[in-house]
Image: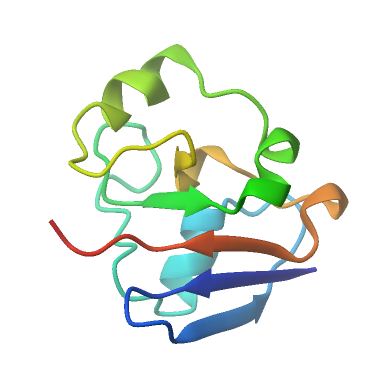
């Protein structure tokens, strides 16, 4: 299944990602600049913040309470904001596009 990360300058990183892998883990494994995942996916930082393209937002599910609180820490939060550690790859997300915000 394919994921595309769009970097701040418009470059793209495209990778095949196995089902069940968090999109943060996939970004780190593929050296996606700007997705650090410092807490390792334990939902205690916001260093894996991405913005989900409009066509994919419903398919990623709802933002949970703790994720919502962590997203309050990012400067450029929007309706598209998600912590990529909270989104797991599934067949429904095959082809998803994520934008990595400018570093804060």
The x, y position of residue 19, in whole percent, is 77, 56
The x, y position of residue 3, in whole percent, is 66, 68
Image quadrant where one finds the C terminus: bottom left
The x, y position of residue 33, in whole percent, is 32, 75
Instruction: Reply above or below: 51 against 58.
Output: below
Residue in the image at 30% along x and 19% along y: 69
User: Please, which residue is most extreme toward the right here?
Assistant: 91
What's the colour scheme? rainbow
Image quadrant where one finds the N terminus: bottom right
Is 51 positioned to the left or the right of 19 in the image?
left
Instruction: Reply above or below: 92 against 25.
Output: above
Instruction: Reply above or below: 64 against 61.
Output: above
Instruction: Reply above or below: 30 against 71.
Output: below
* Depth check, front residue: 80 or 41: 80
Residue in the image at 74% along x and 64% along y: 18
Residue in the image at 26% along x and 32% along y: 44
The x, y position of residue 30, in whole percent, is 49, 79
User: Please, which residue is most extreme toward the top here?
Assistant: 65
Q: Could you tell me how many numbered marks the image carries?
A: 0
């Amino acid at each position: 299944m394919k994921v595309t990360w769009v970097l701040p300058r418009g470059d793209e990183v495209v990778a095949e990602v196995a089902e069940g892998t968090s999109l943060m883990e996939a970004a780190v494994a593929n050296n996606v600049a700007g997705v650090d995942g410092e807490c390792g996916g334990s939902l205690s930082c916001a260093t894996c913040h991405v913005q989900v393209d409009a066509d994919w937002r419903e398919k990623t599910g709802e933002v949970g309470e703790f994720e919502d609180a962590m997203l309050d820490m990012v400067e450029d939060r929007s309706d598209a904001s998600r912590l990529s550690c909270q989104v797991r790859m599934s067949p429904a997300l095959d082809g998803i596009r994520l934008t990595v915000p400018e570093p804060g």
